[in-house]
């Protein structure tokens, strides 16, 4: 894990931010960004070893203490226990980032009902259950939830049916939660990343016949000339989670380097 250079802003000083799927990739970048901006970050993941490594890196830096919770967000009972344990530890929550997600590269014919249900449980049901479990513990104003969706919510890709369905559902969940939670002054928004260089991306790239050619092609189809980095998503999350966006709710912010504005690659 490398040190990221930040502007030294402090929008989140004194606030508690929960990030799921925070052990690596986009989730870790989000936790890193929020910590650098002053947040007391709670890292949630089922990968215990990587989770502890991530927290150790952040706790070695100046700033608020970070905490870890090993949670399988596909299990409703574990979410309920986490919510209770969190409030005993911190007494509050100001920002919830539902980032945990899984993807299966399986064709329409290969998919099983169990595959479909597993993806939906992590990618869509868990964000709802997290929001439901924690909503009562947000402050009386200025709370925020940011859901990590995907450009898959609006655009079709091969071998991605359950993932795309879950991410499209997350947009609907975001809008409906925004309406339901508005009286409590909890804003709910989504971020829709495009191609981001993460471990998940690297795993997929290794499955294609010519990884180097595919890497070049996926850079070239972006109007801005590159694939995204986890930090690109993290900064969008920080914006939607802080007071600078206090009149924005129920929206989905696309972070894809212009990929989806093109009519043809």
Image (cartoon, grey):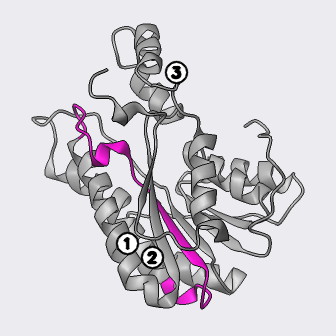
Look at the image and give the residue range highlighted in magenta.
135-160
- Which mark sits nearer the N-terminus, 3 or 2? 2
Residue 100 in the image: x percent, y percent? 47, 55
Q: Is residue 169 magenta?
A: no
Q: Is residue 6 left or right of residue 109?
A: right
Residue 262 in the image: x percent, y percent? 33, 29
Q: Is residue 100 visible?
A: yes
Is 139 in front, or is 202? 139
In the rendering, which numbered label is found on residue 131?
A: 2
In the rendering, which numbered label is found on residue 88?
A: none
Do the residues under discs 1 and 3 have CB atoms within 8 angstroms?
no
Considering the image in quadrants, where does the C terminus appear? top left
Residue 29 in the image: x percent, y percent? 64, 47
State which mark lies toward you, 3 or 2.
3
Which image quarter: residue 206? top left
In the rendering, which numbered label is found on residue 225?
A: 3
User: Mark 3: which secondary structure?
Assistant: loop
Q: CA distance from mark 2 to mark 1?
A: 5 Å
User: Mark 2: which secondary structure?
Assistant: helix
In the rendering, which numbered label is found on residue 128?
A: 1
- For the point 87% across and 52% down, the residue is 61
Do the residues under discs 2 and 1 have CB atoms within 8 angstroms?
yes
- For the point 42% across and 81% down, the residue is 132
Q: CA distance from mark 3 to mark 2?
A: 36 Å
Mark 2 neighbour class, 10 Å CA radius: few under 14, some 14 to 19, many 20 or more: some
Is 209 in front, or is 235? 235
Q: Is residue 44 left or right of residue 193?
A: right
- Which mark sits nearer the N-terminus, 1 or 3? 1
Q: CA distance from mark 1 to mark 3?
A: 35 Å
């Amino acid at each position: 894990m490398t040190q990221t250079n930040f502007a030294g802003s402090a929008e989140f000083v004194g606030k508690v931010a929960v990030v799921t799927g925070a052990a690596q990739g986009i989730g870790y970048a989000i936790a890193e960004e929020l910590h650098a901006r002053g947040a007391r970050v709670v890292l949630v993941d089922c990968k215990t070893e990587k989770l502890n490594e991530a927290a150790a890196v952040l706790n070695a830096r100046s700033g608020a203490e970070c905490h870890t919770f090993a949670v399988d967000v596909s299990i409703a009972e574990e979410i309920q226990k986490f919510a209770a344990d969190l409030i005993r530890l911190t007494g509050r929550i100001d920002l919830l980032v539902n980032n945990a997600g899984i993807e299966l590269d399986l064709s329409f014919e290969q998919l099983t009902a169990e595959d479909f249900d597993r993806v939906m449980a992590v990618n869509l049901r868990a964000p709802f259950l997290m929001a439901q479990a924690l909503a009562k513990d947000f402050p009386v104003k200025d709370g925020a939830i940011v859901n990590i969706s995907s450009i898959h919510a609006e655009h079709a890709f091969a071998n991605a049916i359950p993932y795309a369905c879950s991410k499209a559902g997350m947009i609907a969940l975001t809008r409906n939660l925004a309406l339901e939670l508005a009286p409590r002054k909890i804003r709910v928004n989504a971020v829709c990343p495009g191609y981001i260089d993460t471990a998940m991306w690297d795993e997929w790239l290794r499955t294609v016949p010519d990884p180097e050619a595919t890497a070049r092609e996926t850079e070239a189809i972006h109007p801005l000339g590159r694939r995204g980095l986890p930090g690109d998503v993290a900064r969008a999350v920080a914006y939607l989670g802080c007071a600078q966006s206090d009149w924005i709710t129920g929206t989905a912010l696309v972070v894809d380097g212009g990929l989806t504005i093109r009519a043809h690659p």
